[in-house]
Amino acid sequence: MNVKNTSIYTSKNTSIYTSKIPYRGGRMCIPGVNLDKDHTFSRLRKKTLVQDTKKVNCPAQIFIDRVLRFPQYKARSSSEGDKKIASRALRLGLTTKDSKAAAGAEEVFLMKIPDNGSHRGHVTDIGSVEVIQRSWKMSTRSFLHVVKKINNVDQGLIDRCTRFMVGDKQIGIILPDSLATLEKYVDTFDKTLNDKNQMCLYLKSKYDTFESRSEQLATVLTDLRARDVFSCLKGWRNECYNAFDRFCDPPLFKVERSASGLLGIKASGVHINGYVKTIDGIKLWIARRSLTKPTYPGLLDNIIAGGIEAGRGFLETARKESQEEASVPDELLGNLKPAGCVSYWYMDDRGILPETEYVMDIELPSEFQPVNSDGEVLEFYLWPIDKVQEMLYLHLDQFKPNVAVVMLDFLIRHGYVHPDNEPNYAQIVQGIHRTHF
């Protein structure tokens, strides 16, 4: 990258305006950048005048700011000395041959819309100005941040974890902090290296049936819960997930749902996109989770979703949840259509979660109104697709993380997100189909 005659700053309100940024790295749009706040990472910025959306003879002007952020050169503190060190390191990185600095840049597009008073010769109501604004927002954004939020477990962390084994089958993955506690249950687990010199935690071979494994693990988890060792067990549900080597194989044991992240087992659920075809296009039903839910209270969700409990199948779960969460009548359940799956590696205070969500679509008539019957939904919304896209991009924190990925998958499958309007299309598709173990 040529940085001649380009200044690099990291102090408050000193982003650089440059007439040319010969950047050749990948594109990634990150929402939520506030140019009025102090940032301790270096960035380059240019301002470009864009007039394509102007009406004839209207003097109003739209500005697009392109910002390149380099988080790998973040200053260690807000002191001027550390900022100068980061700036020098970035400049050196950008001028060094074979440097990875440019490839590590994050690209952001920021839009400044003219005030209504600057328009001339036409009305400035919702049909004249705001539609133009929305079209420009759509053209400059990427949904890669949706995928990065749900895939917050990198390979380095996975490599530092311990494999949870039943015989020669890996059933889970355990974080280092959790291992230190679990390995103390010597009557249940053996910690040893496998034949590939990888550290593993084995369930003792004397527990050789589904029932004996399930009972012994329940004993351990009940003790951990009583001693208040792991915060995830405070969400004890008295519901169990089956643990598999592969989802098509017979389960090896069942385990309390709240402990699935503690043991890192491959959990699965069913998520259903309920949509309505209208003369204005497809609209998608959205649910807001009850404020009393033990996980993600008050966040946005699919109209129907639920984990696959031990003893239940995929279609059985889909039908059960459809009736409980949205009161879908039997005559409409025939519209349920399997639509693939999404998979990811996610981690939060419950532990590490290598999960797969089986996705279904259901077309619903315009007169259908969902009614919750199990107390898990606060309210429902029927949103047009552009509203769904705008919410995913601008207000991702309002969605349950895996729900955002399921909705993004819907947008891809139905042609709303494609390679011509999403610069990170291939990376997104790969990111919502990560392999586990």
Image (cartoon, rainbow, N blue to C red):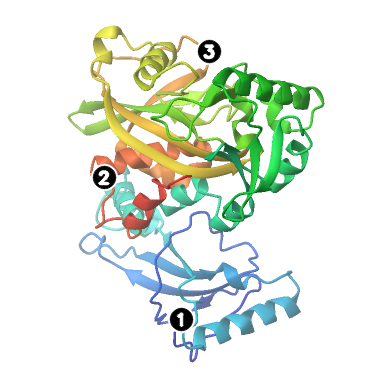
In the rendered view, tell whether residue 40 sits above or below residue 152: below
Q: Give percent across and percent down for residue 201.
A: 66, 41
The residue that label 3 is drawn on is 375
Q: Give percent across and percent down for residue 405.
A: 42, 41
Residue type of the residue flagged with mark 2:
Tyr
Residue at horizontal 56 percent and vertical 50 percent from the top: 153
Residue type of the residue flagged with mark 3:
Gly
Q: 10 left or right of 127?
A: right
Q: Give percent across and percent down for residue 171.
A: 54, 37
The residue that label 2 is drawn on is 416
The disc, 3 or 2, on the residue closer to the chain's N-terminal end is 3
Q: Secondary structure at mark 2?
A: loop
Q: Give percent across and percent down for residue 143.
A: 40, 51
| Label 3–label 2 contact, CB within 8 A | no
Task: Kindly report which numbered mark, 2 or 1, lies closer to the viewer in this rendering.
Answer: 2
The residue that label 1 is drawn on is 18
The disc, 2 or 1, on the residue closer to the chain's N-terminal end is 1
In the rendered view, tell whether residue 358 sits above or below residue 433: above
